[in-house]
Image (cartoon, grey):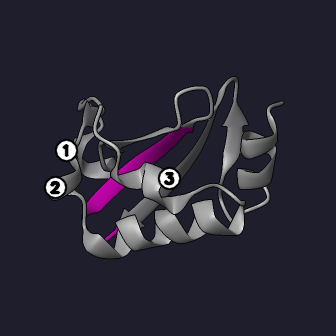
Amino acid sequence: MREPIAALVRQEGWRAEGAAARVHYEGGRDRYAVEFYAETGHVLYWSVPTDDDEGGTAAPVPRDGVPDPLRRRVRGDLDEAGIDPAVERRDL
């Protein structure tokens, strides 16, 4: 496992998935999956269907559509893992 991934999985809720680390967040009626890719140093946000929308599919979310508290939390997790939190702001 790559060191940045290993460091992130020590943060609450993160788990390793190959060359990426993923965490799920739920707030209000919204659910998000957040992925960090070590090789490219990118963070991706996905909207995940809720229990009420079991037939829905995950869809990518642009950063301006992600709540600020979630983005701050992700940057904090990255920082705690020794990863430059500025990667959260990188465009694809």
Q: Residue at the location (48% across, 71% down)?
A: 73
Q: Residues within 10 Å of mark 2 (few under 14, many from 20)?
A: few
What is the crowding at mark 1: few (fewer than 14 residues within 10 Å), some, or many (at least 20)?
few
Q: Which mark is residue 65?
A: 2
**Residue 78 seen in the current view:** yes
Of labels 3 and 1, earlier in sequence is 3
The magenta segment is: 27-36
Q: CA distance from mark 3 to mark 1?
A: 16 Å
Q: Is residue 44 left or right of residue 6?
A: left
Task: Assign a secondary structure to mark 2.
Answer: helix
Q: Nearer the viewer, mark 2 or mark 3?
A: 2
Task: Report the Cα–Cα distance between label 2 and label 3.
Answer: 16 Å
Q: In this orientation, which residue lies closer to the viewer: 58 or 22?
A: 22
At horizontal 51% and vertical 61% (from top left) the residue drawn is 85
- Disc 1 marks which amino acid? Pro
Place of residue 50 in the rendered image (x, y in percent of width and height, measured from the top left): 31, 50
Residue 27, placed above or below residue 52: below
Task: Please give the label number shown on residue 62.
Answer: 1
SS category of the residue bearing label 1:
loop
Q: Quadrant of residue 43?
A: top left
Give residue 1's position: percent from left, percent from top.
84, 30
Q: Tag count in the figure?
A: 3
- At horizontal 34% and vertical 55% (from top left) the residue drawn is 31
Q: Is residue 4 magenta?
A: no
Q: Position of residue 6 (x, y in %)?
A: 81, 45
Labels 2 & 1 near each other (Cβ < 8 A): yes
Q: Amino acid at mark 3?
A: His
x 65%, y 59%: residue? 13
Residue where numbered disc 3 is placed: 24
| Residue 89 image point, x, y percent | 34, 53
| Residue 67 figure quarter | bottom left
